Image (cartoon, rainbow, N blue to C red):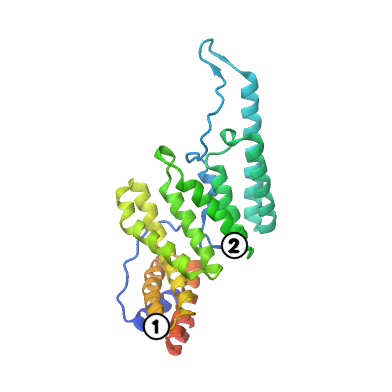
Amino acid sequence: MLARAALTSIRRGVGCRAVAAVRLPSAASANALFAVAPAAPRRWAASTTQEEVAENPVNVEEWTLDQEIVAKDVAANKKWLDMSARLEELRKAGDQAGLKAAIIDAFALLEEVGPTRSPHQCAVLLALERAQIDLNLGELDAAAEQAASAVQQLDACTGAARDPVRLAEARELSAFIDVARGNGDAAEATFRDLLKWIDVGSSKEMPMVRVAAKNMRRTVSTGLGEALVLKSETSGDKRVECREALDHIVDALSQHVDEGDFANGKRTLRCAYKAFMGLSDAKQAAATCD
């Protein structure tokens, strides 16, 4: 109720109509705006970005198995199952430092057994989770490096290996890292490009991609609002950025509230407060806090 009241207050403050919410499953976790990391182990079935051919244990001429290859596959699978259980346990415990150490070990395991005996898109998913953890820990340069690595790998995929949703998620995380680093221009450009893809480009994709794209819209809108407010802090006339930021914030907050995503709702309200302060509207800023 408090979130809906705040949304009503903001709408009155900016003088706009309600934005229809898209009723889709939330893409964000309770602890972070971007939720690739918690979902990673359940999404290891995607196409690999590695162009390597796996060893075939079957001798098709004699219909026999190469037991050495089978043993390697079984051993690698066991190691990844153990690693997955370790990562999941650390996620549940909320141990960011321990999780980061485990991901470093997972990268080492990937190097040891090779991409063909590892979960598909393993390097990308580990890089994204590492980037999220580095962002949570305030290690922004390391976070940016990991996110850029994931974007580069995904962007290089073609054909059946192409994953437009994963690429969009990686770019979104990279843009939020830019916001945290104070790079408003880069973040704004990425968020605008993502909104264009969500509204236009994704319409050419498969239905599941279109659904995922619409589900991303609310977090991308929050991100664009944050980027614009960040830019307004060094702008000669901050009113332009702050007004546009509020347009995107109302769009995002409407959907956050409708989805019951209170963590993102609070984050968006904090951004709304900054935008109203940028417009020198202390009364509306106070109403937003209330």
Q: Is residue 23 above or below residue 65?
A: below
Please say if 97 is above or below 55: below
Q: Residue at x 40, y 68 (%)?
A: 252
Asked if the residues shown at circle 1 and circle 2 are in contact, with their CB atoms under 8 angstroms apart, the answer is no
Task: Give the residue at mark 2.
Answer: 135
Residue type of the residue flagged with mark 1: Arg
Mark 2 Cα-neighbour bin, 10 Å: few <14, some 14–19, many ≥20: many
Q: Specify the amino acid type for callout 2.
A: Leu
Checking the image for residue 39, the label placed there is none
> Would you place residue 216 above or below residue 64 in this image?
below
Q: How many marks?
A: 2
Viewer-proximal residue, 77 or 50? 50
- On screen, residue 184 versus residue 100, left or right, reads left
Residue 259 in view here: no
Q: How many other residues sit within 10 Å of disc 1, few (<14), some (14-19) or many (≥20)?
A: some
State which quadrant residue 131 falls in.
bottom right
Question: On screen, 78 above or below 90?
Answer: above
- Which element is circle 1 on? helix
Quadrant holding the N terminus: bottom left
Q: Specify the label residue 239 is tagged with.
A: 1
* SS at circle 2: helix
Q: Where is residue 143 in the image (x, y as percent from the top left)?
A: 59, 59
Residue 46 placed where, x, y %?
A: 48, 41
The one nearer the camera, 34 or 224, is 224
Provide residue 226's location: percent of width, then percent of height: 47, 71
Marks 1 and 2 sit apart, C-alpha to C-alpha, by 29 Å
Q: Can residue 284 be seen in this view?
A: yes
The quarter of the picture where residue 56 lies is top right
Residue drawn 61% across and 18% down?
66
Q: Residue at x 44, y 74 (%)?
A: 3
